[in-house]
Image (spheres, coloured by chain):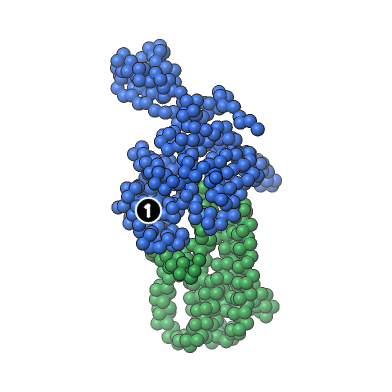
Chain colours: A green, B blue
Amino acid sequence: MNYRYWLRLATRLWSSEYAHMLEYRAEVILWALSGVLPLIMLGVWSAATDGQGAGLEMNQPQLARYFLSAFVVRQFTVVWVVWQFEQDCLDGRLSPYLLQPLHPLWRYLASHLAEQATRLPFVILLVSVFFGFQPQAFLMPQPGRLLLAVLAIGLGFAIHFLLQSLVASLCFWTERASALERLLSIPLLFVSGLVAPLDAFPPGARQLALHTPFPWIIGFPAQLLSGAEVDIGAGFAAVAVWIALLLPLLLLTWRLGVRRYSAMGA
Amino acid sequence: MAIVSARGLSKSYWVADKQPGFAGTMRHFLRRRSKELAAVRQVSFSIEPGEVVGFLGPNGAGKTTTLKMLTGLIHPTAGSLQVAGHLPSRRQRAFLESITLVMGQKQQLIWDLPPLDSLRVNAAIYGIDDYEARRRIAELAEMLELEDELTRPVRKLSLGQRMKAELLAALLHRPQLLFLDEPTLGLDVNAQARVRAFLADYNRRTGATVLLTSHYMADITALCDRVLLIHEGRLFYDGRLELLSERLAPWRQVRVELASPQPAAAFANFGEIESLEGSELRLLIPRQQLTASVSRLLAEHQVVDLEVSDPPIEELIGRLFRQGSLEEPGP
């Protein structure tokens, strides 16, 4: 298969999924609204630090930029593949997908990318409103930094997608993989940088968190986007290590899982 | 050379074994028990290219499990299998491009979009260029009488239209081997007839091999010269349909609505009385006596309505197995 085949396939998959998402645009906006936790945490931290950001080694505009960035990153790293896959597995829709010469995960990936495109105008609107209320937080990142931030968001999404797909593939064994997803959602909430910048963690907890994949999903891209000081090389190296670990593990789990597939519901 | 060759094919599942009630629930929670269920046992058959073969059997006989093994969806527990020159469970691209499986109402079409959107994706997946895809879609849509429905959201289509759209999607890549699991399930009589006519036409035009399961005897009689009969996972019959039909249904079911209730004795010499409730009579009449018996019935009694049908295949097979008329295959 040459690159033209894959380009045409990617375009077709994405455009059909985008059309599908547009049918549910109101729902997508509601989902996007449900991701305002970082903005709530900004309010909490602003009140707790008396509007000075004291104790976080940040001033108020930096604090605002970080949580706004975390909000943006969160919008583009949301993954729901485990629920979609579980549903497809239980109601038999996975079977026709498995009978096509295309790995079903490509469909889910296209679906996520289409959903991100649907969210994009809404996110731009919300960020504009935010800067209207907090003009002192406004910062236009340097083009190079912005590009790196976009790349880090994409890779953060890749880590989250691989992690959740790995859990989803346990459906071949457990049938209820979404219950196992709780094992991911709790650390994602507390150690990814959603509720507090990692720099605010006690040193021991911070070191521990940095050895998990979660800070690379939210915290690292958010730091890059907000213009905060960050070790870019080490960050991307950690991201590369996690992807290199998760991808083969996912492919292996999938291969073993498909052998156990009983095509229930089909 | 056979396009499908199955030798000693078996499939077993481990299924949870739970007793009902609170005590059963607690026992099941504390100590899970499961038991092995043999869905398919030592099934052997082969199919030549271009054949249309009916796969018959009551619910839970192992038909769908066998189809899933033939398509590579599930792995056999034992036995050997070659389909279109491939080992299905390896699910190689060339194999997947040569087969299709249509499973009743299990849809591959995107529910909220028109079928054309899903067809465009399928064309890209199978590497069919736009010109060729348009040509094939037009040809199949004409055969299926589906031209106007391709731009309407799938959720707005009737069951029959949806089934035909599913068939179109399943055949876009021109598979040489079609596995159809209950392709007319839930359709009205007209839609069933159109799907049957389409399948017969498709087989004639393309020479594709078809293996289909159905609960409707009419599907089997319209399409298949040969049938495989499976029961409790074992293959009981592999041969020509006419021979099986004679053994399975040497009689037809006749439902009669009489103008007024009559005693059963009045119908004793028309055939076997299956039921008589008020003015509703059901008779089983031998095929060769059908015309004469129905003529006499109409002449001698006041009949409001009359319907002649084949009894459901499941009932026929069940009756036959209860009578023990079919012998198990030899070693």
Quadrant where the C terminus of chain B is found in the figure:
top right
Q: Is residue B271 above or below residue B87?
A: above
Instruction: Give coordinates of residue A83: x percent, y percent.
Output: 53, 59
Image coordinates of residue A226 in percent, x first then y, are 51, 83
* Quarter-of-image position of residue B233: top right
Kindly identify the residue that appears in the image at 49 percent across and 53 percent down: B98
B155 up-or-down from B220: above or below:
below
Residue appearing at x 43%, y 20% in the figure: B286
Task: Point out residue B230 in the picture as x, y percentages from the top left corner.
Answer: 55, 35
Image position of A12 with respect to B321: above or below: below
The reply to whether residue B25 is in sight is no
- Rendered residue at 52%/82% (across/down): A148
For the N terminus of chain B, the image quarter is: top right
User: Seen in the image, is B9 located left or right of residue B147?
Assistant: right
| Front-lying residue, A27 or A197 | A27
- Residue located farthest toward the top when viewing the structure as drawn: B265
Q: Is residue A158 above or below residue B261?
A: below
Q: Secondary structure at mark 1?
A: helix
Count of numbered badges drawn on the protein: 1
Residue A232 in view in this figure: yes
Which residue lies under the disc numbered 1?
Answer: B154
Q: Residues within 10 Å of mark 1 (few under 14, many from 20)?
A: many
**Residue at screen point 36% across, 37% down:** B189
Tag 1 subunit: B
The residue type indicated by label 1 comes to Val
Q: Write down the quadrant of residue B191 in the picture.
A: top left
User: Residue B121's spot in the image, x, y percent?
Assistant: 42, 61
